[in-house]
Image (cartoon, coloured by chain):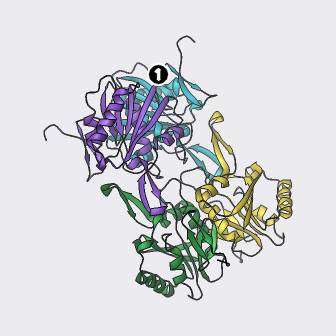
Chain colours: A green, B yellow, C purple, D cyan
């Protein structure tokens, strides 16, 4: 079992820089999360971009898609900002023979209280269990790409109900 | 989606009591983990027993099995000590129409660095993704009950290789 | 023994708001720090302002000084942003019969790894031990107001050496 | 400014060993606390013993006293279990020309919520501010050796009131 992780930035990787009293996207936090959890599978982490997800362009999404398609691993974890995570998930639809799970967090992984560790764990659990396809794990749920949205008022992800 | 959690004690729930300078099994930590992760599904937590898993008896395992069978929920999460988690998992084999995932941790959930949050996340991800059956999620892996052991020297769970 | 705390904002109180993917100054974190440490003295916390310290004006400093002078407590703790902490400390010089200690942090108190808890502890230790005067506790040091500067390159506070 | 730290074990240094599902006294945690707080003074940490303080003997206390007397540093921090911290503090009375502060914690330093970091900060603040003598910093208070006891029911340290 081998997992390839592409990190795209977002809240999950935000660090605080005293120099400018501001937060910016830093190194992929998934590495620390895996180390603390003492994971027993092989993995490779690649930092594709360090962006707020609102700044992601079509070119960025195409780059991510190309890299996933070309990668040998069949289990792909993407860490991503929450604001456009659903857009990127839909952009990845149709890649054959791979389980692709996107996750991120509402609060930076470096916080004492954060949803990042749980979300990454949830993604890793889904990655080994789901058939090929594109999924989002947020708020302890495993959503199908194309059937999920971020509810900004309630600060959580939810299914798109059919009748809407 | 509704998840029923049965907590059985173990390292994951260990707290420190200054009165006797010792650690004992305390309240189910899964509640705090779910709150911090802001999970968006319904769940019910029931503390079945607060034991080191080395002290679990056949009666304890029968009680757990009976309660799972009788429960309305089809997604069952069991938090459990690591030393006999594989025995309990095998004891639960054969329960129809339910996805049952056991998890726990090597380090108490209350530690600043712990595998508990990640493991519970991983279990929740598997719970929604796997077909009916009994599984263990530890060290970021989703194992089939009956095909996994705790490697005490390496402090991690691993598959039982067929040829052994 | 009673301590009065005036919080003025700064990095120590920064929280993350998912709504605008940004950090802002939030509630005084000193309350949580005191609760976690199970402090056994009486205290009163008052949030005077929630600002980055670069935005503090002469009026803000005058307000702080006036409130300290009028307060009954003789032990005053001020939590403050680090960028202009030394300026505010000097502004408070000359207040009689009170021990005044300013502190803050380079990393928000809500981070898993932070200097905030240690710094507040250090300030509380100095507050009970020093003669009347104005002090800054940062990086584990207790500095006299007027004899300390923030070294932005080294990310720490240091004494102003006489010969300079 | 240089601080010498003698660690004697106690709750503050407790770690969890999965091998025997038990907590034991481990490496001095003060090192990690100082690193996280980015302290800007010189220090030397020496692990004298790794004991529950209930197991400390007269010989242990004599060893600690001898090592403090012989040490060049005039600022001495002792981390110690809480149950007999007051006894050790009294044993150290009379050492001339040194500020000696004992501290520890009710909850291990490795917990996510702990009093350890605050207590060490408080000790470091007192160490630089007090005249020569022996002190205990617990629960945010700076006590004189000989005038303090652990109140086991209330889980905190308190002054011995004169009339008792």
Secondary element type, mark 1? loop
Query: Residue A151 falls in which quadrant of the image?
Result: bottom right
**Residue that sits furthest to the left in the current view:** C163
Picture layout, residue B81 above or below residue D100: below
Query: In the displayed structure, does residue A74 sit left or right of residue A50?
Result: right
Residue A157 to residue B81: above or below: below
User: Which image quarter holds the N terminus of chain D?
Assistant: top left
Closer to the camera, B43 or C120? Answer: B43
**Picture quadrant where residue A160 is located:** bottom right
Q: How far across and down, in percent of the image, does residue D107 sit?
A: 56, 40
| Residue that numbered label 1 is attached to | D145
Q: Chain of mark 1?
A: D
Q: In which quadrant will I find the C terminus of chain D?
A: top right
Q: Is residue D14 left or right of residue C48?
A: right
Residue C11 on image: x %, y %: 38, 50
- The residue lying toward the viewer, choosing from D72 and B111, is B111
- The residue drawn where x is 20% and y is 40% is C160
**What residue is rendered at 69% in x and 58% in y?**
B82
* Image location (x, y in percent) of residue D5: 41, 36
Q: Position of residue B121 (x, y in %)?
A: 62, 64
Q: Is residue B88 visible?
A: yes
> Can you see residue D71?
no
């Amino acid at each position: 079992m081998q997992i390839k992780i592409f990190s795209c930035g977002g809240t999950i990787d935000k660090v605080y820089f005293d120099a400018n009293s501001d937060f910016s996207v830093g190194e992929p936090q998934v590495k620390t999360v895996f180390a603390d959890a003492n994971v027993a599978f092989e993995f490779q982490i690649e930092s594709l971009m360090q962006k707020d997800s609102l700044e992601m362009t079509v070119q960025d999404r195409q780059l991510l898609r190309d890299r996933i398609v070309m990668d040998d691993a069949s289990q792909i974890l993407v860490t991503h900002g929450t604001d456009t995570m659903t857009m990127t998930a839909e952009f990845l639809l149709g890649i054959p023979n791979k389980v692709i799970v996107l996750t991120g967090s509402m609060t930076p992984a470096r916080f004492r209280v954060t949803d990042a560790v749980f979300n990454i764990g949830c993604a890793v659990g889904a990655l080994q269990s789901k058939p090929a396809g594109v999924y989002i794990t947020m708020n302890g749920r495993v959503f199908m790409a194309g059937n999920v949205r971020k509810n900004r008022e309630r600060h959580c992800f939810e299914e798109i109900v059919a009748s809407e």
